[in-house]
Amino acid sequence: MAVTAAQVKALREKTGVGIMDAKKALVATDGDEAKALDFLREKGIAKAEKKSNRIAAEGLTEVAIHGNKAAIVELNSETDFVASNDTFKDLLQTVSDQIALEEPASVEDALKLKANDNETLSEAIISATQVTGEKISLRRFEVVDKTDDQVFGSYLHMGGSIASLVVLEGGDAETAKDVAMHVAAINPEYVDRTDVPADRLSHEKDVLSKEDDLAGKPDNIKEKMIEGRLNKWLAEISLNDQPFVKDGDQTVDQYVSSKNAKVVSFVRYQVGEGMEKKSDDFVDEVMGQIK
């Protein structure tokens, strides 16, 4: 049957697909919009499967807070260009909200959650993949619970290239946000030096004991030097001991204590950390397509 321009326009507005894709879907389904939507979804699934081997190491992080529950989430794309568009950002917000509200146990469980229009998060990601033309994937998340006496603080750096989520015992939202900003900027590994595992502490002490400038020194002097260096290392990786990013004259612990609070926990995500990234230059790739 003949497909009208109005039908194509309506389908494009609902799906964000190109003119030809919308027309093909309507022709294949005899102009039935509902069936055309299913056709495009199936096509989107096929596209997503074809893109499954691509590296999606760009993207954004987000923090969603709902009452005493919060979720920190990383959603990946292939390029930062796609990560900056509204389709991707809206999807990230939807994914983050649903995870915070429903606390799934794994990424696999999260993808089964229902999102807008009764579609699953997996289906929403497939739809976004279809619209953007890039592989989009939910990489990881962490759900954090707090009590009524505790306070959440969150911070997004550069619109979501880094996200941090902090829980304070006592204090207020402003203090918690300040600590979250510090976590994003300085990247501590532990809340307190007492949290450092014994095996890691032992390994670091062993490494320090073998440094060249300790050779030939008396054992008592060597031990003091090792302990001094170990304390310095612990202060560098422990949030409580770090100089506060907004006031280097006091440690984070001193700042938080002055606000009648204590750091309970923190989580920090940086987009793509630990992932292999595409080595080709995106600009060169685009220019190559133009030629």
Image (cartoon, rainbow, N blue to C red):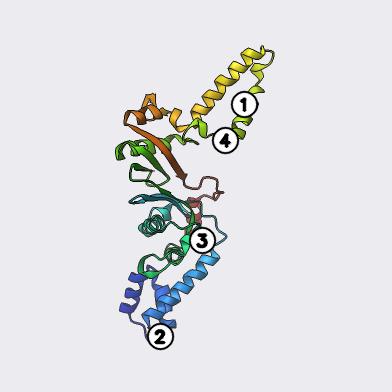
The image shows residue 85 at horizontal and vertical percentages of 37, 56
The image shows residue 93 at horizontal and vertical percentages of 37, 56
67, 7: nearer the viewer:
67
Q: Secondary structure at mark 4?
A: loop
| Residue at image mark 2 | 30
| Residue at image mark 1 | 205
198, 209: nearer the viewer:
198
Other residues around mark 4 within 10 Å, as few (<14) / some (14–19) / many (≥20): few
Residue 19 versus residue 76 in the image, above or below: below
Inter-mark Cα distance, 1 to 3: 40 Å
* Amino acid found under the numbered disc labelled 3: Glu
Inter-mark Cα distance, 3 to 2: 36 Å
Q: Secondary structure at mark 1?
A: helix
| Residue at image mark 4 | 197
71, 15: nearer the viewer:
71
Dot 1 or dot 3, earlier in sequence: 3
Quadrant of the drawing holding the N terminus? bottom left
Other residues around mark 1 within 10 Å, as few (<14) / some (14–19) / many (≥20): some
Please report the residue visible at 32 percent of the width from the left and 36 percent of the height from the top. 171
| Residue at image mark 3 | 108
250, 61: nearer the viewer:
250
Residue 213 versus residue 98 in the image, above or below: above
Between circles 4 and 2, the one closer to the viewer is 4
